[in-house]
Image (cartoon, rainbow, N blue to C red):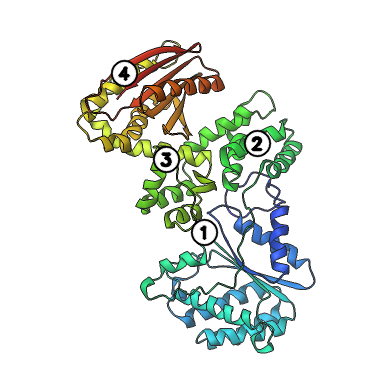
Amino acid sequence: MKEFNTTGTCYPEQHYMMDNSGKLAAILSLIERGKYFTINRPRQYGKTTSMFRLADQLRAMEAYMPINMSFQGIDEKWHESDANFAQMFVNQLKKKLKFVYFDLFKFLDEYEESMGDMDDLSLLITEFVHQVKKKIVLFIDEVDASSNYEPFLKFLAMLRTKYLARNQADEATFHSIVLAGVHDIKSLKFKLRNPEEADYSSPWNIAVDFEVRMSFNPQEIAPMLEEYSATEGVKMDVLTIAERLYYHTSGYPFLVSKLCKNIADKIYPKKEDSTWMVEDVDAAAQILLDESNTNFDSLFKNLENHTDLYEMVQRILVEGETVPFNRHNPVIHKAIIYGIFKRNGRIKIHNRIYEQLIYNYLASVNLTKIRPRHNYSHHFTTEDNGLDMKAALLRFQQFMKENYSEKSLDFLEREGRTIFLAFLTPILNGHGHSFKEVQVSLEKRLDIVVTYFQHRYIIELKKWYGEQAHQKGLLQLTNYLDIHGVDEGFLVVFDERKGKEWRTEEVTVEEKKVFGIWV
């Protein structure tokens, strides 16, 4: 019985899978041309599954011998010396060949204990290639699974030397090598024990750039849904559901599969009919945001361990700042490696799930700062299970006046929006959710869409740039209210002027009511 898989390698006979045939064909073309390259993508991005399926395809081709190995879970002593690394590598080869090519296993067994350095390993590789007489394709997964990489980088340098002289019989080597990991080879150098002593000439400058898109578009997601629908007898508008999955995930493989799994396991069994709806995808996204998993743990760990990255994410996500893409910026490079950013002319959070997840996280962090000073005895619910948002905003204005009126102007610019998001969280109290939409403009608007039971509220946060800009902003807000089909909107204006009024405003613009506060 098939299922949606969110852990480990995916197998077509066991799991519902997206269509990665185009990606595999592009990677196979690199292999057939004898290229060396690295698939460096974030965790749970389909790297391991792709390598296993490529190896299967190569095994069906008479001219090739694929060998898969992984550095994950190997005894840490392998990086203590060149000899340890060489012995580990030979042992890995032996394990892969023992039950398939026993003669080659015995050949390697005779050499393992004599591995003293990289020169010994280089000679063995040459003799091994001559023994095989096929095009050997080496796949190495989890190449960044250690805390130190000096022997591994020396290994890559040895492979580079052999690659450059690969047409000579005494330097015969692997036809193609595919490395996979989160980090690219250049960033591995920063994990050396003594990075200041490292040779920064790249040991992998023979590798071609890997430009295959590993995320999945709606057309590639659709075949998985079609198979599920046919197998399980479930009705759905396949392309519409695929597009909604992409809307939330930007095609991140783990997130797509997780949303599908949430619908199949947690939402569909409770439905009265046998149909998947767009609303089910949205509900699955909310379930996912409340879950804990290793993917999210890794995301938060990367934010917590890199202050510069944390600050840039907050500037983009909370303050609405526009950051242009620059691949040479080390913070941006780091965030793309970890799957937090994507390039779209400017830097954006990779997907809406991550955007909302990080947004909730930042609000929670700031909530711990303001909770001791905030009286939550006020209740803002209405008889129809809605929120008295006007009362909530007036309470926020009072809260800011009591606690932050003496703060510096740059504090308001830096922290005001975050404080509001934190203030909102306990009011929703598990019965509602808030989503953000950054509007890129001079005003650095941040629109918050709040859902509370069946109700929806639009709150716009923006800085004060004068009356003319304010009137223009009101028109923009009414257009946004039209998009969401609501007749009333709310406004929080962060006013940095000295001697400002803590004013409120209630106006009607193009038949839309807007209530605003100044803080």
Q: Which mark is residue 182?
A: 1
Q: Residue at x 49, y 50 (%)?
A: 325
Q: Is residue 474 left or right of residue 413?
A: right
Q: CA distance from mark 1 to mark 2?
A: 27 Å
- Contact (CB < 8 A) between labels 3 and 4? no
User: Which label sits in the foreground, 1 or 3?
Assistant: 3
User: Which label sits in the foreground, 3 or 2?
Assistant: 3
Q: Which mark is residue 394?
A: 4
* N-terminal-most mark, 1 or 3: 1
User: Does residue 509 appear in the picture of this structure?
Assistant: yes
Secondary structure under badge 3? Answer: loop
Q: CA distance from mark 2 to mark 4?
A: 39 Å
Residue 412 placement (x, y as % from top left): 29, 34
* N-terminal-most mark, 1 or 4: 1
Q: Residue at x 72, y 75 (%)?
A: 135
Quadrant including the C terminus = top left
